[in-house]
Image (cartoon, grey):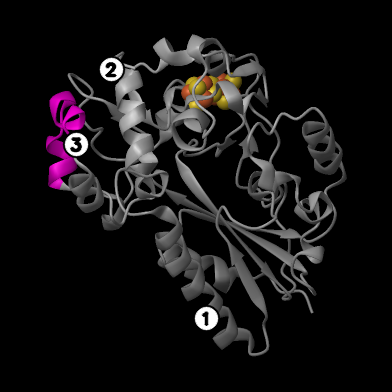
């Protein structure tokens, strides 16, 4: 029997999530067609994992048997203080603190436990950036935002600096209304991207994107992009920083996302002298640790113009 699920939404906010919405599980026909042509045109660059299970990505019932409702959750990570950018290299705001996968996992697990306590036999499974689920498409279906021309989820009230978590559940909740796009005539993100990675509105070429190049790229950075790092050594927020909807961003209240005093004190000279031991200590709980010392050092050298 369908219920409003208001208790779940209230609990999600109590757990610190910024937004929570529901969508009826089913096949996303439009997204499936888009995704199939995206793969056919090989626009996924080196992200080969996206080629697995394309059908599953657009139909969560094939991912978790019995799914009736998709629960979309957003967690704000917009920092109160931007790390100094003068005489410094720049890391993406989402990586200032603890690895978001861990932070979101704790919270989604707590919400799933609550659902079990409330509804007894509920079966649910959480996904944070891993597993065959199109998070942005489902967040849109849940009424949490739309995919902007920068290809990121934009929440109309608080902008794009949010992590997305998805829970698939066999409980039946009243769905929210899917969000529609509000980019209008704006093209700021497309115009400001330093590498031309946003080749067209809504179309990102990962192999030109600084976020992909500084984190995922393993085959080497194309020569022609080496002078376009603009001090970025892990991720890139440029197409978010310029988005007018991010004027509505408010600082997060998640202690785990705060940068350490050491990270706050770092300037270019410290980065250029970073040892593997310091890397391990500084980033042991961070998503940055996953790219490894060698990759970060390579990024630093490219940004410094010394590679
Ligand atoms: S993250 Fe940076 S490089 Fe990638 S599309 Fe946005 S502005 Fe361009
Ligand atoms: S910068 Fe403008 S076009 Fe780009 S996502 Fe934001 S509103 Fe949309």
Is 253 one of the magenta-colored residues?
A: no
Q: Position of residue 266 (x, y in %)?
A: 15, 34
SS assignment for the magenta stretch, majority = helix
Answer with the quarter of the image where residue 161 lies.
top left
Disc 1 and disc 2 in contact, CB within 8 angstroms: no
> Residue 113's mark?
1
Disc 2 and disc 3 in contact, CB within 8 angstroms: no
Closest to the observer, 205 or 124: 205
Query: In whole angstroms, how far apart are the C-alphas of marks 2 and 3?
Result: 14 Å
In the image as oriented, which residue stretches furthest toward the bottom? 120
Closest to the observer, 96 or 81: 96
Within-10-Å neighbours for mark 2: few <14, some 14–19, many 20+: some
Answer with the quarter of the image where residue 117 lies.
bottom right
Residue at image x 59%, y 14%?
187
Say which of marks 1 and 2 sits in front. 2
- Say whether disc 3 or disc 1 marks the residue closer to the N-terminus: 1
Q: Is residue 173 above or below residue 307?
A: below
**The N terminus: image quadrant:** bottom right
> Residue 304's mark?
2
> Residue 274's mark?
3
Closest to the observer, 257 or 205: 205
**The C terminus: image quadrant:** top left
Q: Position of residue 297 (x, y in %)?
A: 30, 32
Q: Is residue 205 left or right of residue 295?
A: right
Q: Is residue 73 left or right of residue 55?
A: left
| Disc 1 secondary structure class | helix
- Say whether disc 1 or disc 2 marks the residue closer to the N-terminus: 1
Q: Is residue 179 left or right of residue 237?
A: right
Highlighted magenta segment, given as a residue range: 261-273
- Say whether disc 2 or disc 3 marks the residue closer to the N-terminus: 3
């Amino acid at each position: 029997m369908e219920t409003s699920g208001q208790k779940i939404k209230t609990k999600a906010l109590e757990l610190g999530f910024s937004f929570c919405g529901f969508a009826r599980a089913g096949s996303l026909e439009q997204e499936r067609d888009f995704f199939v042509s995206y793969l056919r045109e090989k626009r996924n660059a080196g992200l080969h994992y996206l080629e697995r299970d394309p059908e599953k990505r657009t139909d969560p019932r094939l991912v978790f048997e019995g799914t009736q409702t998709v629960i979309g959750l957003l967690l704000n990570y917009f920092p109160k203080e931007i790390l100094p950018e003068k005489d410094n290299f720049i890391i993406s705001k989402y990586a200032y603190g603890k690895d978001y996968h861990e932070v979101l996992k704790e919270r989604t697990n707590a919400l799933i436990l609550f659902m079990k306590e409330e509804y007894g036999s509920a079966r649910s499974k959480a996904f944070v950036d891993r597993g065959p689920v199109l998070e942005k498409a489902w967040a849109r279906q849940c009424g949490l935002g739309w995919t902007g021309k920068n290809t990121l989820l934009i929440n109309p009230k608080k902008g794009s600096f949010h992590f997305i978590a998805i829970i698939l559940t066999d409980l039946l909740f009243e769905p929210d209304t899917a969000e529609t796009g509000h980019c209008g005539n704006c093209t700021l993100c497309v115009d400001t991207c330093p590498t031309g990675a946003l080749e067209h509105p809504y179309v990102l070429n990962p192999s030109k994107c600084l976020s992909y190049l500084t984190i995922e790229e393993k085959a080497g950075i194309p020569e022609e992009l080496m002078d376009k790092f603009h001090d970025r050594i892990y991720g890139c927020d440029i197409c978010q920083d310029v988005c007018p909807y991010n004027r509505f961003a408010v600082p997060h209240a998640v202690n785990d996302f705060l940068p350490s005093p050491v990270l706050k004190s770092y300037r270019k000279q410290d980065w250029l002298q970073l040892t593997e031991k310091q890397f391990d200590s500084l980033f042991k709980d961070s998503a940055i640790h996953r790219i490894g010392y060698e990759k970060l050092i390579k990024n630093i050298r490219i940004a410094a113009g010394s590679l």
